[in-house]
Amino acid sequence: MDILRSPFFYVGDKYKLMPQLNKLFPKEIKTYYEPFCGGGSSFLNTKAERYIVNDINFYIFKLHKLFKQNAKKEEFFVNILFDLIKKYGLSCSYIGINVPEELKKKYVKTYYAKYNKEAYKKMRDDFNINQANFYLLYLLLIYGFNHMIRFNSQGLFNLPVGNVDYNNNVAKAIKSYLNFLALNNVILKNFDYKIFLKKQSFEEKDFVFCDPPYLISQSEYNKIWNTEEEKKLYEILDDLDKRNIKFGLTNLAYHKGNKNEILLKWSEKYNCYSVNSNYISFNDNTIKKDSKEIYVTNV
Ligand SMILES: C[S@@+](CC[C@H](N)C(=O)[O-])C[C@H]1O[C@@H](n2cnc3c(N)ncnc32)[C@H](O)[C@@H]1O
């Protein structure tokens, strides 16, 4: 099975781990539940009869919704994006709107950022006027620094331009996600994980996969995570186990000299595997070899 990349290129994206994780997931999954779905790389690479996926982040939820609503309308969807790209004057290597050669020579490593800077700012200002056009938000994510979704304390999208554009990888990821949504039953939710899990009535052969924020590393979404949340999540998973509901969880056990004691202690009750990841933090793009990620499951 080819690994599909989510078109959101989300920080903490699990796509590289999916071949390893899939081997440890139940062989047959009826409903796949994912309370912290982020960009969606995990469910996108898992076979199930249906998917009920959730994230607390309203904007990533809206972006998934935008894709779902366009699942069977790929041409319509990408044409809206291309029209906006042309309207703002962004580069788009996928459709041959290239950065001029002289700029490429002058700014060998940063020419996309140089070329797109003003157009990106205009697009960001327009989005911030009423934040209702999620096509604009998607393009802000694609052209933005590290493909992040970030808002300031006044609620304005405030990420600077990135050094990328809409290229073949973006086009491929859009196509495969729209195709996945067209062929599969995917239900999207926008709750806190505790409420999301409480609302479900699980059946045999269902599976809950959790990829929560990491307690011991830094990331935009880790700001809303803490020790209390971590403990609560493990209590909920213990409860699922008592009810014979299968679950799996990935998390960082060690990172930059930090150790997640709560996780390590809790994991002793279940099956625990080491998974190889090249952990990249958003504010530190170097690959950290002193990180250890684990997968804990009652399967
Ligand atoms: C590690 S990321 C998931 C990445 C995802 N597996 C992927 O491949 O893109 C964790 C996610 O948990 C979400 N999150 C944080 N706190 C949450 C909460 N209390 N309830 C639900 N989702 C939450 C964040 O918005 C973030 O998208």
Image (cartoon, rainbow, N blue to C red):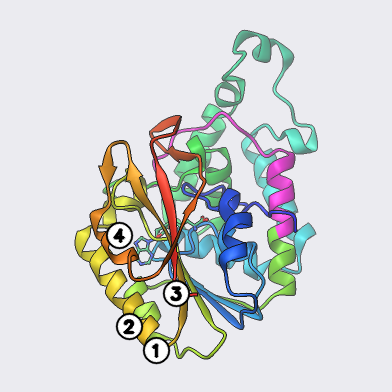
Few, some or many residues within 10 Å of mark 1 (<14, 14–19, 20+)? few
Q: Secondary structure at mark 2?
A: helix
Q: Earlier in the sequence, mark 4 or mark 2?
A: 2
Few, some or many residues within 10 Å of mark 3 (<14, 14–19, 20+)? some
- Vertical order, 272 against 27 (above or below): above
- The alpha-carbon separation of the residues under discs 3 and 4 comes to 14 Å
The percent coordinates of residue 206 (x first, y second) are: 54, 83
User: Which mark is nearer the camera, 3 or 2?
Assistant: 3
Few, some or many residues within 10 Å of mark 4 (<14, 14–19, 20+)? some
Q: Which residue is mark 2?
A: 239
Mark drawn on residue 243: 1
Q: Looking at this view, is 175 or 242 the one in front?
A: 242
Q: On the picture, is 187 further left or further right than 251?
A: right
The quadrant the N terminus occupies is: bottom right
Q: Is mark 3 within 8 Å of ligand 1?
A: no
Q: Is mark 2 within 8 Å of ligand 1?
A: no
Q: Which residue is mark 3?
A: 298
Residue 171 magenta: yes
Which amino acid is tagged 1?
Answer: Arg
Q: Earlier in the sequence, mark 1 or mark 4?
A: 1
- Range of the magenta residues? 156-176
On the question of residue 263 being in view, the answer is yes
Residue 290 magenta: no
- The alpha-carbon separation of the residues under discs 4 and 2 comes to 16 Å
Which amino acid is tagged 3?
Answer: Asn
User: Which mark is nearer the camera, 3 or 1?
Assistant: 3
- Is the C-beta separation of discs 2 and 1 under 8 Å? yes
Q: Earlier in the sequence, mark 3 or mark 1?
A: 1
- Vertical order, 152 against 188 (above or below): above
Q: Which residue is mark 4?
A: 263
Task: Give the residue displayed 79% in from the left and 32% down from the top.
Answer: 96
